[in-house]
Amino acid sequence: MSPLPATHRALVLTTIGQPLKVKSRPTPQATPGSVNKCGGINCITVIGSNTTSISINDLRDTTYTKYAKIPLENCYKLNKKQLLWLTIKQGLDYTIHDLLPLIMQLVPFGGLHCIGVEAGDKVIISPATGPFGSAAVQVALAMGASVIAMGRNMDALKKLQAIYGAERRQLVQITNDQQQEMDALAQYGPADAFFDISPPMAAGSGHIMSGILSLKHSGRVCLMGPGIGDLTIPVAILMAQNLTIKGKWMYEREGIRKMIQMVEAGVLKMGSQAGWVIAGKYQLEQWAEAFASAAQHAGPGEQVLFTM
């Protein structure tokens, strides 16, 4: 293996409120219990002396830098032989870029998994048209559930359906009229679970209560939108319907392993094989353009990449 360069490039925030800068930094060296790797989902380049569970050239995720020193316990490898088998047997033909949505899909998977979503469940997902909400739709479908996707923008909801197909998914528009939303949800019968990952700008929206009140007896709720503010919960209904409400931040180690198994088994399709498109590729020096492009392409199935 070729030796690592003495320095590498990294996108650095030196002061809050000031622009990011691309700086040259000393290349970190792997020590016992750590690995060194390069950029997104990419290849391990160096391993510590006592490292056995990760090998050079294994694939894992990363940050906005060419090389980074990562604790071994934070590394989860993808089975390249199994991914190659999927290429041969199912014609998926994955590239490194195709695997990048995994990083985003892990977040809603953590929430769906924590409320026990499983095959045959009916899940309301809101809002379903942003990057995490649309990823939640794809993940829930891969878990075997049917989905009722809620969102304010009907065109974006239809785009979501065009990407992932109409099988096992329905669309309901968020209108800020709770009764109207509940009537629309009621067309598809009581749901088993409600997953919400609303952004801060949705604070005060009534759609969360519409979702909760559309659940069947013993329904489950997962809230992953930290900026929505306080909610008034109808305790009498909560008790009578035996509802469970959970808050969830990100995901856990078990969830990471389970989701990687779904990818390696071909259950969760990735990248272009699942309708994802790359809206742009940028160098670190083009970070401002990249962030602006990402803001414009934050809808279903869109991603913007840094390339090293």
Image (cartoon, rainbow, N blue to C red):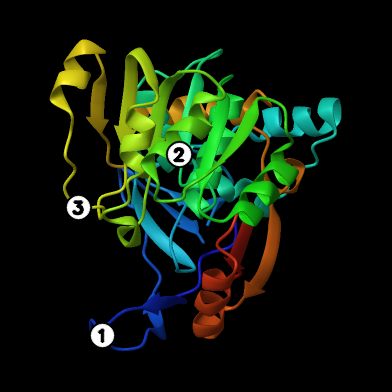
Q: Position of residue 217 (x, y in %)?
A: 33, 11
Disc 3: which residue: 229
Left or right of residue 7, residue 281 in this image:
right
Above or below 304: residue 289? below
Pick whichever, 226 or 209, lies toward us.
209
Find residue 51 and report its image quarter.
top left
Report how far apart the C-alphas of labels 1 and 2 lie in the structure: 40 Å
Residue at point 25%, 50% (across, down): 226
Residue of label 1: 17
Residue type at mark 3?
A: Gly
Q: Are the two marked residues, 1 and 2, in contact with CB atoms closer than 8 angstroms?
A: no
From the top left corner, tell me how far across and down residue 259 is, in percent: 50, 29
For the C terminus, give its image quadrant: bottom right
Label 1 neighbour load within 10 Å: few <14, some 14-19, many 20+? few
Dot 1 lies on which element?
loop
> What residue is disc 2 on?
181
